[in-house]
Amino acid sequence: MNVDGTAYRTVWVGSNDRSVHIIDQTRLPHEFVTRTLSTVDEAAEAIKVMRVRGAPLIGATAAYGVCLALAQNPSDAFLEESCDLLLATRPTAVNLRWALDEMKAAVSVVPEGERLDVAYTKASEISDDDVATCAAIGDHGLGLIRDAWEALGQSRPVNVLTHCNAGWLATVDWGTATAPIYKAHDAGIPVHVWVGETRPRNQGASLTAWEFVNHGVSHTVIVDNAGGHLMQHGRVDLCIVGTDRTAASGDVCNKIGTYLKALAAHDNGVPFYVGLPHSTIDWTIHDGVRDVPIEERDGAEVTDISGRTRSGEISTVQLTPDGSPAANFAFDVTPAHLVTGLITERGVCPASADGLAALYPERAKPAA
Ligand code: MRU
């Protein structure tokens, strides 16, 4: 995607050296800042404090983190230690484990002296695969938006509701939930997006909205609690969200509040789609509600809020009284029966074990 006319990915390798570069998402939407990662510790820190975030981007950054680790020390022991460090940064997005497994499988079978080259090649394959995968999700999801537009007799823009940021900032490029939106916009289909702010960290208000301003996509930021009201009044034609971990049964784990949107969509007959790459499917889990680990983050993300003051400084203020405890569950699970369809790089399928098995026959195994 372009930022002020320059094409960016969210993670890339420098042209002169092998340092890794990222967009520091903690500074958006008010400042566009890139950072250089030079060590595996810096890669782990970037994931942990969410300079990079979003399931596919967490995986791609971790892959490059392994490269940085091997540049420091190519031994088996340091590879293991570094993968453990990276894996411990964020527990919910399964892309992290997937990318580390891919990296370990690629480098552990070659001698220490060859590991660095193999690692950079593999990490760039993971990145390129994510871009191609997300573009294909966009192509398949575009059909759904076009169908909605035709069902409206092309009389008005299609209203899509999304949650959190499953945009290009959450992947290497394109996004998952946003890829169909970008493809529809670029194809001339009028689309308007309701962007849920997504408390506590406001990835919708700060990141998705920033993406749409940049790309010229018509959108309106709403408080999270407005989604149900809009659906009751016919002002949402379809919902599209992302996922951090998709169970083999089709249950989807995504940013906290996704489940409530899905309930409201179900009650109002609004189609609820989830965009996802193959790397988000956890084939070992068959009951998402029971078995997906839910990250719990610092309560300060709930009690405090950051933004730009009228005089232009970035400032953090406290919302709650001194002494009020806060709980910060970062994700929830939407059961498959509330999901109309999964938009994958291989096509759109029902959110079910059979639906996923039909698209990924090489991966699917019967539930234990
Ligand atoms: O906590 P975050 O910002 O990493 O959470 C991101 C999300 O929940 C996204 O919707 C999900 O990773 C899908 S990204 C294409």
Image (tube, grey):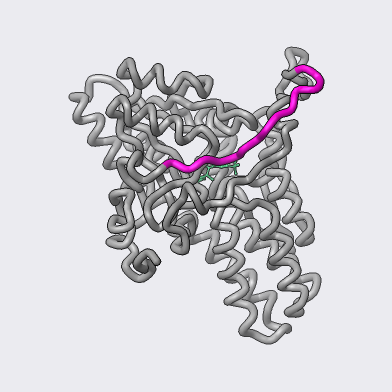
> Magenta stretch mostly in which secondary structure?
loop
Question: Quick one: which residue is furthest to the top in this view?
Answer: 310
Q: Quadrant of ligand 1?
A: top right
Viewer-nearest residue: 112 or 99: 99
Residue found at x 72% / y 73%: 79
Q: Is residue 287 above or below residue 313?
A: below
Across and down, in percent, residue 43 comes to 73, 56
Q: Is residue 8 visible?
A: no
Left or right: 366 as drawn, with respect to 217 = left
Across and down, in percent, residue 316 comes to 77, 24
The magenta stretch spans which residues?
321-334
Q: Is residue 23 above or below residue 91?
A: above
Left or right: 113 as drawn, with respect to 236 = right
Q: Quadrant of the C terminus?
A: bottom left
Q: Is residue 92 visible?
A: yes
Left or right: 347 as drawn, with respect to 251 = left
Across and down, in percent, residue 304 comes to 74, 25
Q: Is residue 196 above or below residue 90?
A: above
Viewer-nearest residue: 201 or 263: 263
Q: Quick check: is 329 in the magenta stretch?
A: yes
Question: For residue 274, what is the image quadrant?
Answer: top left
Residue found at x 69% / y 66%: 83
Residue found at x 79% / y 74%: 73
